[in-house]
Amino acid sequence: MKWRKRQESNLPRTPSRPPTVLKTARATGPGPAAAGVECRVIDPGTQAAQGPGQPGELLVRSAGVMRGYLDNPEATAATLDAGGWLHTGDIVTFDSDGWFRVTDRIKEIIKYKGYQVAPAELEEILLAHPAVADCAVVGSPDKTAGEVPKAFVVLKAPASAAELTAWVAEHVSPYKRLRRVEFTGQIPRSPSGKILRRVLAERERAAREEDLTGTVVLISGGGRGLGRLLARTVASKGAAVALIARSGDELAETVAEIEQAGGTAAAAIADVTDHIATAAAVAELQPDFLVFLGRHRFEKGELLNQ
């Protein structure tokens, strides 16, 4: 009888084993490779083999792996390499016993300045915050970085964007930090409960298509409600935001949220029904934005009233 020589992989060989009661941590993953199936985990960028605990793309090879896609050589070449390894597109980690845990899909990985950021890792950290009920992280288009991590968050208790950004920063490397946060009422999910990141990513790209960089938007009543929402929205599109309202504490919170998300904002306290006080507030804000944009850009600023 002929035996095919097994190729070396970067995973320990896992023998067939009888059913056992799984530990909780392992019960969340697919487990070890089935008998007769070889596995490798590689860095999607460098193709280098990954070790235990290091995330990478899962490759599999066995007699049962498909030969290719019917009449579609391009798709076949993208999925099966010359060595017969099938590229699953799944980002996984594995332990020293060869137990796998799926963490993400390659197509959902955020590419920040050449670094790869897994959304699921940031979501797991956010969900550990006591104020977060649900969340999803996607790549948000950015002219400098290519993409930056942005979180859509459903709250179950009061929390600011600055607080959540700092929470994540305590647990990850600098390049993995959240750059933008948006609060929402619901995270889109499939009937099976899977996060529909594609829906959020498409919405984010559409929102970023209108670039307001180089403009100043003056918003009255920007400390809460519709005014605060409008301020965050235009700031996310690149505008510098000038805020006027009666509550200094609420204005400070709005400014902090915008700055934590990478935007520019300043505020002045005034009753917008008092034209003299409003004019004084605008005069107070003007020097900040003259420095940032120059007088000619400030004069083209857009006045939006709530």
Image (spheres, rainbow, N blue to C red):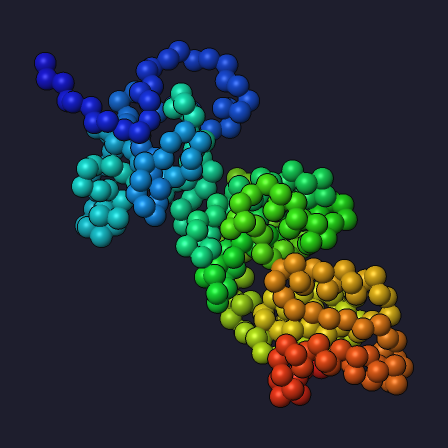
Instruction: Report the residue at 48% width, 48% height from top.
Output: 117
| Residue 300 in view (yes/no) | no
The image shows residue 120, relative to residue 237, as above or below, that is above
Residue 78 or 248: which is nearer the viewer?
A: 248
Q: Position of residue 163 (x, y in %)?
A: 70, 50
Q: Is residue 225 left or right of residue 12?
A: right
**Residue found at the far left of this picture:** 1
Residue 76 or 153: which is nearer the viewer?
A: 153
| Residue 136 in view (yes/no) | yes
Q: Position of residue 204 (x, y in %)?
A: 54, 61
Q: Quadrant of the N terminus?
A: top left
The image shows residue 243, relative to residue 119, as above or below, that is below
Where residue 191 sits, quadrant-wise, is: top right
Where residue 111 sits, quadrant-wise, is: bottom left
Instruction: Report the residue at 43% width, 51% height from top.
Output: 115
Q: Is residue 256 left or right of residue 16?
A: right
Q: Position of residue 8 (x, y in %)?
A: 24, 27
